[in-house]
Amino acid sequence: MDEEEKAKIKARKARIRKARTAQRKLKKARADLEALGEITDWEDEFIASVDERLDKYGSAFADPTKGGFGEALSSRQKQVLAQMRRKIKDKGKQAPHHGSREDPAKPKWRSSFKPKSGFKPNVRHIEDEIFEDADTPPPKSKPRLRIIDGGKK
């Protein structure tokens, strides 16, 4: 088996893998849209026709100018699928899942940079002390160095 045959086999396996991945994404989108009750006739027909072409040909488009060589979906089909996912995400946020225990108003994760509680450290502000002492007048004489007895003799 020479290098060209190995490359062809590898490319064929990659196309099959990409077609299966695209089919999984389409089926998941259909199931999610049906669960939300938001699937339209056009979306249902689109998913069915693309799924059928993926089964039959391993690719959902024939014109090479509309997508990559080894891709299963054309660029426009990817955009439509992305719009469906966005729709699922938007509609899913509005209505909480039936029977879920999570509060939809609470975020699922929290940034580690945000404060975790109402903790405020005890910090000494020098400005507070200066303004408190502003009422007392400064000393009238110059400071002087004095030697205090009590050291080693």
Image (tube, grey):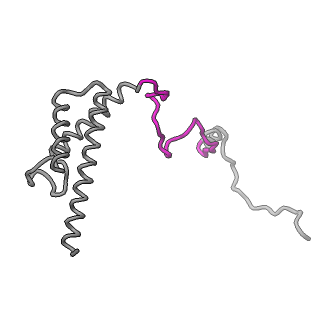
Total numbered labels: 0
Q: Position of residue 27 (x, y in %)?
A: 27, 38
Magenta run includes residue 34: no
Q: Quadrant of residue 10?
A: bottom left
The stretch drawn in magenta includes residue 108? yes
**Is 121 situated left or right of 23 in this image?**
right
Q: Residue furthest right?
A: 153
Q: Position of residue 40 (x, y in %)?
A: 20, 27
Residue furthest toward the front?
A: 1
Query: Quick one: quadrant of the N terminus?
Result: bottom left
* Residue 151 to residue 19: above or below: below
Whether residue 125 sits left or right of residue 99 in the image: it is right
In front of the other: 55 or 11? 55
With respect to residue 98, does 7 lie above or below?
A: below
Q: Residue 111, image x and y in percent?
A: 47, 43
Q: Is residue 74 visible?
A: no
Q: Evaluate whether residue 8 shows in this view.
A: yes
Question: Magenta region, mostly helix, strand or loop?
Answer: loop
102 left or right of 91 in image: right
Q: Quadrant of residue 48?
A: top left
For this rendering, which residue is in front, 139 or 89? 89
- Observer-nearest of 57 and 83: 57
Q: Residue at x 31, y 26 (%)?
A: 36
Chain part drawn in magenta = 98-127
Give the vertical position of 72 relative to 128 (above or below).
below
Quadrant (top left, top right, bottom left, bottom right) of the C terminus: bottom right
The image position of residue 100, as x and y in percent, is 46, 27
116 left or right of 35? right
